[in-house]
Image (spheres, rainbow, N blue to C red):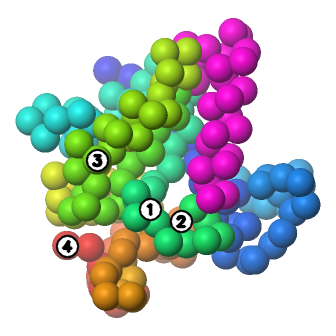
Amino acid sequence: MQAGYVLFSLLAVSMSIASTGQSIAGSVHPQAGTYKLQRIQPAPSGWVLEDSVWLPYRLSSYTTGKITLFSFFYTTCRDPEGCPKIWDAFNAVHDAIKKDPKLQGKVRLVFLSLDPKVDTPERVSFFKTAMSTPEAPWSFLTTWSESFLAPILDKMYIPASRQIGAGRSHPKSTSPGRRRRSGRSCRERRCGTALP
């Protein structure tokens, strides 16, 4: 079976804008040449859930056969800089796919929750129902628990930790470039409270 590949450019763009506080008038996208694109890489084959807790799929099944634009998210996001920019970027691509028959059936959008405790299959299926269309599919995925999410994040070189604030902890994904390629996890480097 051919490995699926994931395009992280929108995630990298949105994260770089949010982390630098950069403001670009009239667009959520930075000007060409002002950012670094993350590499396209094979998607890990970890288990994910879409519409049912009883029917798991491999994440790689969402990245095979089409161009896949992928990002992490959580439904209770309170980051006023990062979350709206990622949503705006994906909505713009989604609208472009719906309007251009040449893109239909060739591009898919995928969001994977960083908060499986809150983002159950029932909760994320609400977003799929509201956002996905036949000509521009948009999958909203979660996992059974953080222990199923952690290997996916590790294989994508995305360290994640819990950010405690306002009475509730929220997952926080850090920049992919911050994880060293040594194979050591965030927990081993003591860079915050790592996911189990």
Is there CB contact under 8 Å for labels 3 and 1? Answer: no
**Quarter of the figure with residue 62:** top left
Residue shown at 56% from the left, 38% from the top: 69
- From what the image shows, is residue 173 above or below residue 32? below
Q: Within 10 Å of the Cα at label 3, are there few (<14), some (14-19), or many (20+) other Cα atoms?
A: some
- Specify the principal SS of the magenta part: helix
Q: Nearer the viewer, residue 112 or 45?
A: 112
Name the N-terminal-most of marks 4 and 1: 1
Is there CB contact under 8 Å for labels 4 and 1? Answer: no
Name the N-terminal-most of marks 3 and 1: 3
Q: What residue type is labelled 1?
A: Tyr
Question: Real-space Cα distance between discs 3 and 2?
Answer: 27 Å
Question: Real-space Cα distance between discs 3 and 1?
Answer: 27 Å
- From what the image shows, is residue 108 above or below residue 142? above
In the rendered view of the protein, which quadrant contains the N terminus? top left
In the rendered view of the protein, which quadrant contains the C terminus? bottom left
Expressed as whole percent of the image width and height from the top left, the position of residue 94 reads: 63, 31
Question: Real-space Cα distance between discs 4 and 1?
Answer: 15 Å
Q: What stretch is highlighted in magenta?
A: 84-107
Q: Within 10 Å of the Cα at label 1, are there few (<14), some (14-19), or many (20+) other Cα atoms?
A: many
Residue shown at 81% from the left, 72% from the top: 22
